[in-house]
Amino acid sequence: MVGHTIGIHNGKEHIPIYITDSMKGHKLGEFAPTRMDPIDERNDNDNKSVMKNKKK
């Protein structure tokens, strides 16, 4: 199977993973990330930023 591309399901979608020699002995699910890091949704115009609104 080395050299093939396999679609691995991460719980939401199929992710194409290219199989290499170093992947031997591992389960395919180890190479499909299932959790996403939370994204900071504040933008540059956010009034909650303490340093920007610090009075002089």
Image: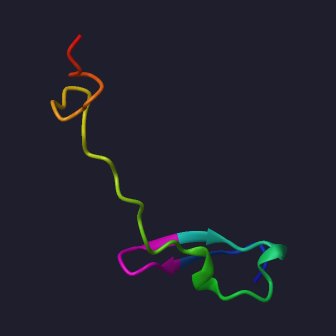
Instruction: Name the foreground residue: 37 vs 10.
Output: 37
Q: Is residue 12 magenta?
A: yes
Q: Is residue 11 magenta?
A: yes
9 displayed left or right of 38: right
Find residue 20 and report its image quarter: bottom right
Residue furthest left in the image: 47
Find residue 31 and report its image quarter: bottom right
Reply above or below: 51 against 41.
above
Find residue 47 and report its image quarter: top left
Instruction: Name the foreground residue: 39 vs 50.
Output: 50
Image quadrant occupied by the C terminus: top left
Residue 38 location in percent, x, y?
Answer: 35, 58
Instruction: Name the foreground residue: 5 vs 32.
Output: 32
Residue 12 location in percent, x, y?
Answer: 35, 76
Residue furthest front in the image: 56
23 displayed left or right of 48: right
Q: Residue at x 77, y 78 (%)?
A: 23
Residue furthest top in the image: 56
Residue 53 location in percent, x, y?
Answer: 20, 22
17 displayed left or right of 49: right
Q: How is the image coloured?
A: rainbow
Instruction: Name the foreground residue: 42 vs 26.
Output: 42
Q: Which residues are magenta?
A: 8-15
Image quadrant occupied by the N terminus: bottom right
Reply above or below: 21 against 27.
above
